[in-house]
Image: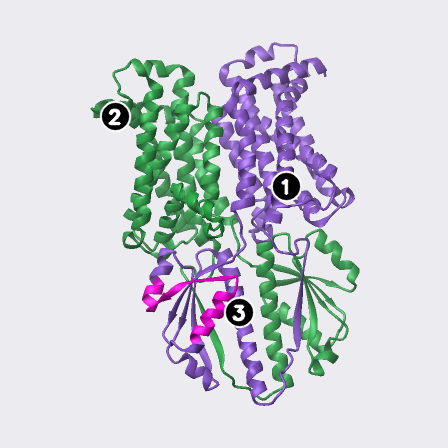
Amino acid sequence: MKVDLIRIRELVRKEFIQLFRDRKIRPILIVAPFIQILVFGYVVNYDIRDIRIAVLDQAQTRESRLIIDGFRGNKIFRITHHLSHDREIEPLMIRGKVDLVLKIGPGLSERVRGGNTAAVQILADGSMSNMASIRVFYAVTVLRSINTTLLHELHPQVIHYGRVDPRIRTWYNPNLDSQYFFVPGIVAIIIMIISLLLTSIAIIKEKEAGTMEQLIVTPLTPLEFILGKTIPYILVALVQMAVVTAFAVWWFDLPLEGSIPALFAASCLFLLSTLGIGLFISAVSSTQQQAVMTTFFFLLPFFMLSGFVFPIANMPEFVQWLTYLNPMRFFLVIIRGIFLKGVGLEVLWPQYMALLLLGAVVFSGAIGFFRKRLD
Amino acid sequence: MNRHRIQAVARKEFYHLARDFRSLYLAFAVPILLILLFGYALSLDVDRIATIVVDHDRTALSRDIVRQLGASPYFKILGNVGDTQQAGKELDRGEATFAVVIPAGFAAHMRHDHEAPLQLILDGSDPNFSNIARAYVTAFFDGYNNNRLESFLNRQGQTVLAQPVEGRIRVWFNEDLESRNFIIPGIIAVIIMIVGAMLTSLVIAREYENGTMETIRSLPLTAGEFLLGKAAPYFLIGLTDVLVAVLMAQILFGVVMKSSFWLMITASSLYLAVALALGLFISILTKSQLVANQAALLVTYLPSLLLSNFVFPVTNMPAVLQGLTFFVPATYYIEILNGIYLKNLTLGQLGSSFLVLAVMLSVLSILNWRQLQKEGFSR
């Protein structure tokens, strides 16, 4: 098939003029990505900075105060309520006013001084199970250091026994900063939304406006038409990618350990798939509403099954296999690898190959399908 | 208000929908897909942590530690590699998320009653995962050390020292700590927003784009009648989606309401009405389907997912965003749903959330009504 570059250039020019003349589309191109990166960057957050804890101290002794001080001295915990009765626990938990309740029973000091174990109750709001596990873990950690102090007081002699000293090091994101994990992913989400939605709609608009007929009678070949229609959005997506990446680095202080050209190469490969899907959607849709809903139908599983929020390793095996069809999955591994791990093609080549393969299949399939619809 | 005129508008909108088979199909397919995805595939629970081992010690003791680790449901030993560098590569590639490096002389240290260092490397890129994984790892070695201490003291003929304080943990509302139990109710809130606001955001914009708004304005139709008629078909679709979601949650995933079904339906209707009013508001303001859709995505879908305490705890957010969450309808609906699904609360206990939703509905309705009057509709 012959491709006439001048014809494509003219179509690209027309598309750009239409795109930027539309005053309503401009905010989508500029404002929407910024809102998304800001909101995602700040909201999507598992950092445990603030565990609200209510304390019910029925012992009122030196030991019980020692425990409470242990929580007060830990900056992750914030004692929000001092309770005086069991009755006060339930309303607090029900209204979600506290995350944990620490209840110290009356006999604490006698048991501890007698060399026995005294139970301290920790009630946790389990509504959000993952957060609850982490909060309980922190509470247990505080109790453990209190135990060390108490044991030392009761039995000043030091026992040496063969024990494991686990030294945990955290790689890639030592402070477990949520933004390090999520912000690179947002870069991928934004270019996916833009490239899918805008390409599908750009073609539907010609159909809805009745200008498709005119385009068909021009000497444009289907391939030229498709290239002319997609190139503007490749450019738009790449520019957005650059802006959002810069924003991630400057605003969110994200380390960009790896190579920028590798990042852009991956984006181009990724765009091959999303533009292909955009073309496919525009071939099967006849109204904007249909296109938007169909886009959504694709976006959701791509988003959910990509490992952006929910780890793929947790999914059932069958679904894990399905994720291999999701270009987003590979793109995210690449983006996070480049941003956080500083790795490049030497490690990520399987992901690059997968994107290339998926993109080639989807894009050429879409072109074939689209041509059949045009005829 | 004339019932027949409302019916006429609703019928017209319904024909639009019925003729546009795909939108209708998606209005049901998207919710079902979401529930299936969230119920079957998505979980924030951490188990089977992919673990790689580097054993420089190669003793019975080091092998025993690895075996015990593998026997725990939280760790899945992928295998042994020769050196730390190789383990690092596995972490780089993302094949493993946790590496245990046992240095040479480990068992000898233990035998001589010393602290034997063990290097543990955790992939920290996913903070939710690493936080929980770190808790498991720490707990595992605490238990291991306690056993060692016990046998050490037994050998010396001493009694084991009792730990002074022990935390007895009780979890309320979601005793088994299953993420499914809060994710499924949350996803119902997102579904209603998608179907309610995203679909309706297009309906009035469509009339403007097709140029049919002129005709509609010239009809003897009041603003209220027009709005109710436009919203009615989507209200039915949305409510059907809620029923489907409730049934799927219960039958497929065993997520059961602790409190009343009718309370759930009442809350859902109210929240759905808010979503529809919001969608129509966006539609009237933007007058363009594409812009309306993007706006709906930004002001309904994303906030419902992100700012509603659904997956991401509001208490972790910066103050400005915490303030924003008060304006997100899903925040209140999810509070109600958690009350109904997990906490067994009554209408009395959830009254304030219902009230806020009702106020939101009234404000949006009045805004819509006034806006349409400005566009030339009669009262």
Q: CA distance from mark 2 to mark 1?
A: 56 Å
Residue underneath mark 2: A9
A207 shown above or below B147: above
The residue that label 1 is drawn on is B251
Regarding mark 1 in the picture, which secondary structure is present there? helix
Colour scheme employed for the rendering of this structure: by chain
In this rendering, the label closer to the viewer, 1 or 3: 1
User: Residue A61, image x and y in percent?
Assistant: 74, 76
Q: Which mark is residue A13?
A: none
Mark 2 crowd level (few <14, some 14–19, many ≥20, 10 Å Cα): some
Image quadrant holding the N terminus of chain A, namely top left
Q: Nearer the viewer, residue B241 or B310?
A: B241
Mark earlier in primary sequence (1, 3): 3
Residue A358 in the image: x percent, y percent?
Answer: 33, 39
Q: Which of the chains is purple?
A: B
* Badges 1 and 3, same chain: yes
Q: Residues within 10 Å of mark 1 (few under 14, many from 20)?
A: few
Q: Which residue is mark 3?
A: B140
Up the image or down, B100 lies above or below B177; here it is: below
Mark nearer the viewer, 2 or 1? 1
Contact check, label 2 and label 3, Cβ < 8 Å: no
Q: Is residue B76 magenta?
A: yes
Magenta stretch bounds: B62-88
> Could you classify mark 3 by the number of other residues whose Cα lies within 10 Å: few (under 14), some (14-19), or many (20 or more)?
some
**Residue B358: horizontal and vertical position, in percent?**
71, 34
Same chain letter for marks 2 and 1:
no
Q: Residue at x 62, y 75 (%)?
A: A146
Residue A96 visible from this viewpoint: yes
Q: Secondary structure at mark 3?
A: helix
Disc 2, SS: helix
Give the chain ID for the green colour.
Answer: A
